[in-house]
Image (cartoon, rainbow, N blue to C red):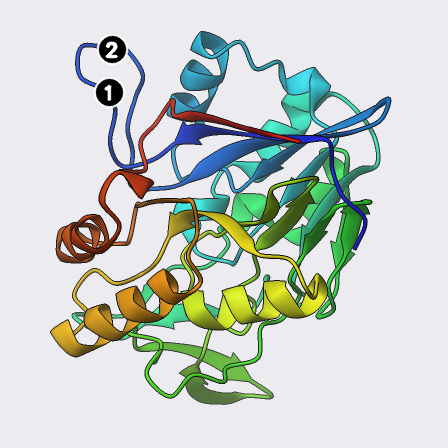
Amino acid sequence: MEKLDSLRILVLAENTVPFGGSLLGQHGLSYLVEARRGQTTMKVIMDVGQNHGALCTNMQQLNVNAGDIDAIVLSHCHFDHTSGVAALLAEIKKQGVPVIAHPDIFRTHFLAAPALRAIGMMKEDSAQALVSAGGLPFLTRDPLPLMPGLTTTGEVPRVTPFEEGGLKVFTISEGRTQEDNIADDISLVACVKGQGLVVITGCSHAGIINIIKQACSLCPGEDLHAVFGGLHLAGAAKERITRTVEELSGFNPRLVSAGHCTGFKAQVALYNAMGERFIPLSTGADFKITA
């Protein structure tokens, strides 16, 4: 994979907010990813949280103009990452804005405990609603390059024996109810000159180690520089947290910033293992990686 000159990750929505500020938190996740290569700069929104009003407030306070957005990436179907995407497209006020996701993202997706509840894409964010608001769906199981040096992972192979999904959810396929392994979980991968790989996740339902291995396969020979996002270890068994932290530490990243669904115990384990190389993810956090 070719390389970027610089990469910026600005957290627009996350569960936590800085002390003493006026940004709004929500159970959700959204980033502005700004990639530059030569004279070309691309601004991508990855996920949109679940509260569009809070997202807009934060975008305004962080000086992010919706009209500058070039594309939207949806990491998976869950409502806390996708609610309000049609509304955001309407505010971008362009036609043909790429909306990049897995082809199964609009499927029926639900929990059965403690009672039946849909947790996938909401009806106001249907495929047709996105098109009507100016979106152009790019739906693929394969890695999709956004520009040289920036790509999606595509569908992530589940190769680690310990990264089970951790969430019992269901779908309906050909008229039959079946368990859903959230195969639509995708991430962003950037390769920055002189720095290496940067992995940006939504919830890591595919397993963060699986995701990193997929990223390394897309850019062989590059070291892992940083990981950002949710690791979906909240409520995970101690053994899984320990194994995940050990495996992640083995890649020797210079920075890991994890939050949202990562869970306090996993954050503590990451800090204990990595020290100052670990930073809890937070709304308004602004990371710049340059050659």
**Left or right placement of residue 73 versus residue 264 in this view:** right
Does residue 260 sit above or below 224 in this rendering? above
The amino acid type, in three-letter code, at marker 1 is: Pro
Q: At 40% across and 78% down in the image, what residue appears?
A: 170
Please tell me how many numbered marks the rendered image carries: 2
The residue where tag 2 is placed is: 21
Q: Which mark is residue 221?
A: none
The location of residue 244, given as percent across then percent down, is 30, 69
The residue where tag 1 is placed is: 18
Q: At 45% across and 79% down in the image, what residue appears?
A: 181
Does residue 93 sit above or below 4 in this rendering? above
Snapshot quadrant of residue 179: bottom left
Camera-side residue: 107 or 74?
A: 74
**Left or right placement of residue 254 versus residue 127 in this view:** left
Camera-side residue: 237 or 221?
A: 221
Q: At 48% across and 50% down in the image, what residue appears?
A: 122
Does residue 242 sit above or below 14 in this rendering? below
Q: Quadrant of the N terminus?
A: bottom right
Q: Secondary structure at mark 1?
A: loop
Q: Secondary structure at mark 2?
A: loop
The amino acid type, in three-letter code, at marker 2 is: Gly
The location of residue 246, given as percent across then percent down, is 29, 69
